[in-house]
Image (cartoon, helix red, strand yellow):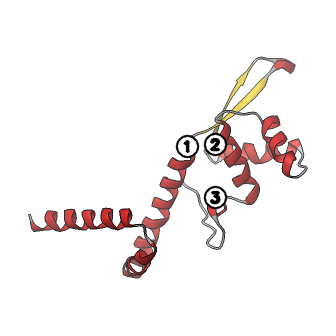
Amino acid sequence: MKIKKFYMHEQGLNHFFGPLEARIMDIIWASGTTTIRDVQTVLNQEEPISFNAVMTVMNRLLEKGLLRKNSQGSGRGRTTFFQPVQSKEQFLSDQTKEVTHGLIREFGDLVVGHMIDALDEAVPEMIAKLQEKLNQMQNERKR
């Protein structure tokens, strides 16, 4: 799934979602499977919110392909459960990869240059992984 917008000046999940969407996704990722009422209950502990507002956002997340739903029972006893399509870690991995590749396609050398400059902020393990990848690429080009 592709997120269509990246909000540059936000933090965390808010780079990819509006604030309520991000909060709802966090709740769903934490619970695994949940109902609209359960999500509303958690959100109400922070600030009052209507069932319809939560339902609307969750249905939009479903339409965007971020959630799937499963209904059990029938009539008034029917309950609809929502689950994330992928884990939070996989979502973040996919989206940051998409953003990175998009920036490189669009701005090439500038982005790579800025990434090199940002290595001062990287943890040693990431620098070692980068060195390993560069060595691998260099060896492949020699062949």
User: Which amino acid does the dot numbered 2 rest on?
Assistant: Trp
Q: How crowded is mark 2: few (under 14 residues within 10 Å), some or many (20 or more)?
A: some
Sequence-wise, the earlier of marks 3 and 1 is 3
Secondary element type, mark 2: helix
Name the one closer to the observer, 126 or 29. Answer: 126
Q: Earlier in the sequence, mark 2 or mark 3?
A: 3
Q: Can residue 1 be seen in this view?
A: no
Please give the residue where the numbered disc 3 appears in the rendered image. 13
Q: In which quarter of the image is the C terminus?
A: bottom left
Question: Which numbered tag is attached to residue 87?
Answer: 1
Residue 72: quarter of image: top right
Query: Answer yes or no: do the residues labelled 2 and 3 have beta carbons within 8 Å?
Result: no
Q: Position of residue 137 (x, y in %)?
A: 21, 65
Mark 1 / mark 2, whichever is N-terminal: 2
Q: Mark 2 points at which residue?
A: 29
Type of residue at label 3?
A: Leu
| Residue type at numbered disc 1 | Ser
